[in-house]
Structure formats: structure tokens, C-alpha cells
Image: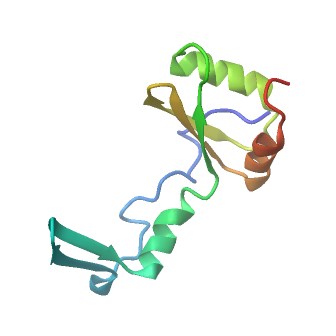
């Protein structure tokens, strides 16, 4: 069963050391309401990659703490890889999966089953 273990999972958000940023990848200009920052397609792809196996969850019932949700989802989902759960507050969570097949399984699971 997949476990929540952010320490041993290196597939988390890319750090600045892992990104390959050139001076041309970020352009800052003045816009009508302030500064505008445009990113190159190459940099956007690098930033998006770390979120490709993420799922935003909304708790539609009572508000629950992170540890409760983690235990509940870990029991409900029979995951193969590791995963991370982040509390965004107001009943929203982000689940990030190490494996695409775990994300797909969670998306295809019938709610309430």
C-alpha cells in the first residue's frame, strides 16, 4: 500500500537547483496594473511537471484535520506508490501522487464506495 512519506519521496516540487533557468526564460515588463512576468514555454513545462500527478480535493462534509483525512484516504485508496497530502484550508486538500496510475485509480473510483 502506498504511504504518505514526503521525506523519502524525491518527486516533490522542483527546487531552484533542479530547474534549468536561463535569463531568457523570465521576462518582466510593465503592464496596465503593475509588473507582468512572462515565463518561457520551457520553464512553464518544468514547473508544470511537478504537478502533473496532483489532484485537488474538496471535503464536502464536516471539516477534518489533515491527519484524519490522511488516515481515511490511506485506508480507502489502495495505492502502489507514495503520495503527499497538503491541507489548503477551508476543506480543500492537494493530493500529489508519485505514480500516474495511482492518480488515475483515484479519479476512476466511484465516490462513496
Relative side of 46 to 97, left or right: left
Q: Residue furthest front?
A: 32
Residue at 77% in and 22% down = 75
Residue at 17% in and 78% down = 29
Image height of 61 relative to 53, above or below: above
**Where in the figure is residue 18, as x and y percent of width and height?**
44, 66
Relative side of 50 to 99, left or right: left
Residue at 41% in and 76% down = 20
- Name the quarter where the C terminus is drawn: top right
The scheme the figure's colours follow is: rainbow
**Where in the figure is residue 101, as x and y percent of width and height?**
79, 52
Relative side of 39 to 111, left or right: left
Image height of 69 relative to 87, above or below: above
Image height of 28 relative to 102, above or below: below
Q: How many labels does the image show?
A: 0
Q: Which quadrant of the figure has residue 76?
A: top right
Q: Which residue lies furthest to the bottom in this view?
A: 24
Q: Which residue lies furthest to the top in this view?
A: 62
Image height of 54 relative to 17, above or below: above
Relative side of 56 to 16, left or right: right
**Where in the figure is residue 45, as x and y percent of width and height?**
51, 73
**Where in the figure is residue 38, as x and y percent of width and height?**
31, 75
Residue at 42% in and 70% down = 19
- Front residue of 2 and 86: 86
- Name the quarter where the N terminus is drawn: top right
Amino acid at each position: 500500500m502506498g504511504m504518505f512519506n514526503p521525506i523519502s519521496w524525491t518527486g516533490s516540487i522542483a527546487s531552484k537547483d533542479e530547474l534549468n533557468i536561463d535569463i531568457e526564460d523570465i521576462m518582466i515588463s510593465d503592464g496596465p496594473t503593475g509588473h507582468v512576468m512572462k515565463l518561457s514555454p520551457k520553464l512553464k513545462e518544468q514547473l508544470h511537471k511537478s504537478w502533473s500527478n496532483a489532484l485537488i480535493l474538496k471535503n464536502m462534509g464536516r471539516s477534518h484535520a489533515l491527519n484524519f483525512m490522511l488516515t481515511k484516504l490511506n485506508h480507502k485508496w489502495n495505492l502502489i506508490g507514495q503520495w503527499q497530502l497538503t491541507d489548503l484550508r477551508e476543506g480543500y486538500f492537494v493530493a500529489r501522487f508519485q505514480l500516474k496510475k495511482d492518480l488515475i485509480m483515484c479519479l476512476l473510483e466511484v465516490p462513496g464506495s
